[in-house]
Amino acid sequence: MADLDSAAAAESSSTTRRTVFWVVLIVLFWAAIYVPGLFRPALLDDADTVHAEAAREMLTRHDWVTLYANGVRYLEKAPLQYWAVALSYKLFGVSEWSTRLPLTLAVLALALVLYRLGSWVYGSRAGFYAGLIIVTSFGPFIYTRFFIPDLIVGLLLAVALGFFLLGLNEPRPSRLACWGLAVCAALMVLAKGLIGIVFPGAIIFLYLLLTKNLRHLLRMRLASSALIFLALAAPWHILAGLANPPAGQAKGFLWFYFVNEHFKRYIGTRYPKDYDTVPLLLFWGLLLIWLLPWSAFLPQAVVRVRQAWKNFWKDTGKKDTGKGSHGGPALESQATLLFTLWPALIMLFFSFSTRQEYYVLPALPALALLIGAWLGRESQINGPQKSGLISAWIFLGIGCAVFVAAAVLGTMASPPAPGYDIADLLRRDPSRYALSFGHFLDLTPQALGAFRIPLIGTGVALFAGSATSLFFRRRCKPLLANLSLALMMVALLACALKGFSIFEPVISSKQLALAVEKQFRPGDVIVINGEYEEGSTMNFYTGRQVHVLKATHNLWYGSLFPDAPHIYENDESFARLWNSPTRVFLWTEMDNVPVPVREVISYQVARWGGKVILSNKPNQMVMESHR
């Protein structure tokens, strides 16, 4: 008996050490990739600072129910991410890093959840790979450069389906499993609206339908779970409806939020018109792009999924023995089926709707789990896996091609002259800006000279990482091969961050805002020529309300309320303002200066990224006049 106790203690100690090792590795890779990105580049115009400003005004107004941006009701969005960032501001002050902190921590939380879920189902090494994949993939990093909630949705959905899987493997689903699922669904509703019900509900229902187990719904404590869901999700919606009733031309919060922002957005009739939709084939292809480099192993994961589906029917009804490092074959088959339905339903849901590139993000955790399961199994097989070697060879070919292209472009492109403005080297094509990264499609051969360092760095990282991965895979060391890919992504994403910083003048107006703030005096007015979101960093970085000239987009609905501030200018009112004694700072794109400004002497305050600040009054900072 003593020997058995000693062996059990030794096994427990070994498991604990292994868990600590895997978790520490995940945290180290997360820190290496995400911590530098907290501080740069500047927050961006459009959604990034519109949302950050809404969080800032939530704090300054002490109003945690109604969102405001630039002093105008901003009723489009659910509040959870704004609450998180407002709390970050309260704790750490308003800054770029405190804006990005909640999303950055959400990535770490998601990685740890995937580690725990993957370890339970497939074993600890598979769990480690699932967490590593989400931390080092291209898409999650890119979309923490923007203030959007889709990764938070992915995190909550992963936890929700983990609770469902837990209840599925209990004689009767426990309160923890059922109520935990209800809490996650409520938080998803508070993060991104009704998809918080649609996604987990559709995935669970279809799973139970396919497995002929719909009776399980009756065991899920539906009454108490519904009460918990409503207790968390309903109060904000009720309070927002009461705080924003129909008034004047506005139909109130409930109509705008549920009808316009949910149903009309889904069928493409939202007003004002939303961003253009991403082409369907590109949308599905983004699953591969956002999971790079790990999507190289997606075919192997798909093959394994087919086998798991076959095994499911014979495994159905088997009980978890509790032995081994994970849940056993029945649980593994159940989970694999569930993890397959998860991304499939999300992608199909948006295939019939307007869609953006980042709508893919909530599907990525499931694919990380499936790929992680295959990588974990690869580590248990003696000898090299043929399919793994094929993927490694293909990836090496891609790495070589990128290395050659980067070397040629990087050496041929001449570095720009000192003091250059990156915008002067681009060709503007607004038709591409429907995509999140449409501005990067403006790059020209001349502009590539500014990106020589990140360009060459990307090529070197891809070649070195893919070659090292193949080297270790051929020697039957898949762990080292996969860590090589992860290290490659540390370097590659550092190059991406450098590229963002170089491109900052085009996608942010921070420096223009700081130039205005140095000169601003009480009574002065800041005007954005165009949509508010085109120059929203002016509002955020100055902390001052801005006027907008001929704006019709994001702040349109809030402007219909009778108490909306008088910040909307047309050509006539702006001409009067520009020619009045009031000092005006005008943000405008250089090729779109308004007529009233062109007709009189104006003064250039600052110029950056193809945008300029003009003033109708001279001051001590003025360097030149502009006609």
Image: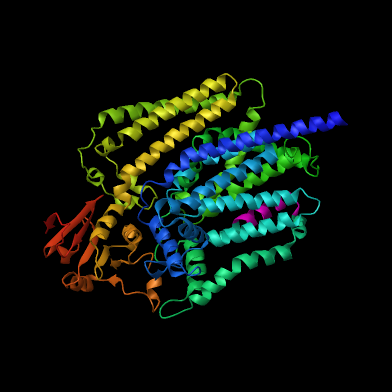
User: Can I make out residue 197 in this image?
Assistant: no
Residue beneath the point at 47% across and 67% down: 260
- Whether residue 259 is situated above or below residue 126 in the rendered picture: below
- Which quadrant: the N terminus? top right
Viewer-closest of 390 and 459: 459
Residue beneath the point at 25% across and 46% down: 423
Q: How is the image coloured?
A: rainbow
Q: Quadrant of residue 501?
A: top left
Viewer-closest of 166 and 622: 622
Viewer-closest of 148 and 168: 148
Residues shaded magenta: 199-213
User: Can I make out residue 134 in this image?
Assistant: yes
Q: Is residue 79 left or right of residue 419?
A: right
- Which quadrant: the C terminus? bottom left
Q: Where is residue 409 in the image (x, y as percent from the top left)?
A: 30, 30
**Magenta-drawn stretch, dominant element (helix, strand or loop):** helix
Q: Quadrant of residue 600?
A: bottom left
Q: Is residue 244 left or right of residue 22?
A: left
Q: Where is residue 366 in the image (x, y as percent from the top left)?
A: 60, 44
- Whether residue 613 is situated above or below residue 61 in the rendered picture: above
**Residue sticking out furthest to the bottom:** 248
- Whether residue 606 is situated above or below residue 387 in the rendered picture: below
- Is 462 contained in the magenta span? no
Viewer-closest of 621 and 438: 621
Q: Position of residue 602 (x, y in %)?
A: 14, 62
Q: In which quarter of the image is residue 382?
A: top right
Q: In this view, does 359 lie to the left or right of 272?
A: right
Residue beneath the point at 54% across and 73% down: 239
